[in-house]
Image (cartoon, rainbow, N blue to C red):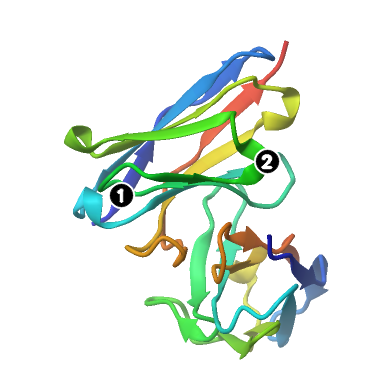
Amino acid sequence: DIQMTQSPSSLSAFVGDRVTITCQASQDISNCLNWYQQKPGKAPKLLIYDASNLETGVPSRFSGSGSGTDFTFTISSLRPEDIGTYYCQQYDNLPPTFGQGTRLEIK
Amino acid sequence: QVQLVQSGAEVKKPGASVKVSCEASGYTFTTFYIHWVRQAPGQGLEWLAMINPTGGSTTYAQRFQGRVTVTRDTSASTVYMALSSLRSADTAVYYCTRGSNIAVAATFKYWGQGTRVTVSS
């Protein structure tokens, strides 16, 4: 199985800050990488697909980049409603695998 | 609109089995794979299995082989996930989610509301 290493595991930032989360795959996955946001008690929500494509309806402050083994997820200007846990997920090979998550809080 | 509606919460004793359903609507049921993902309390997301609703072919995560069975009823647009020999570590919220029409292209835009399964003596 492909291992996805996500960092940091948690972070705290101010409203308006630029926030970056990284995800590293254990092997080349091309651009087969998605990013999800999950709020407590809710199902994950797809934000970014194919490493850099913004899902319809998702605010443009969210973005993704990278290919191969190294990927980055960015929130350009943090808003209070962005709190939650973020996961990367690869789908280059079965089984699909997720990073361990990044818990984002507001300072 | 696409909807995936799951069955209600379950409480089971260790060693028992559970069967969770996922009814799809708002699209052609046989077009897209359905996957199952679980989340233990305070933990991350873990993929269990998937099914091709067209022919019923399945793929399971190796660590669940022999314990998980996914089936579908095309007349009811419903997928079922059964997990046997339950232990406390299986306590989790189980989600069904819709993939794409290609097995490996597992991008999950649509999710069920989740079914909490509690395993306790």
Residue neighbourhood size for the residue with mark 1, other residues' Cα within 10 Å, grouped as few (<14), some (14–19), many (≥20):
some
| Image location of residue B70, percent across then percent down | 43, 35
* Residue type of the residue flagged with mark 2: Arg
Name the quarter where the C terminus of chain B is drawn: top right
Of residues B106 and A73, the one drawn nearer to the viewer in this rendering: B106
**On screen, B34 above or below B82?**
below
For mark 2, what is the residue? B63
For mark 1, what is the residue? B3
Q: Which of the 4 quarters of the picture holds residue A101?
A: bottom right
- What is the chain letter for disc 1? B
**On screen, B109 above or below A70?**
above
Of residues A68 and A38, the one drawn nearer to the viewer in this rendering: A68
Q: Are marks 2 and 1 in contact (CB under 8 Å)?
A: no
Q: Residue at x 71, y 22 (%)?
A: B87
The reply, left or right, for residue B27 in relation to residue B58 is left
Name the quarter where the N terminus of chain B is drawn: bottom left
- What is the chain letter for disc 2? B
| Image location of residue B118, percent across then percent down | 64, 24
Say which element carries label 2.
Answer: helix
Q: Which of the 4 quarters of the picture holds residue A83?
A: bottom right
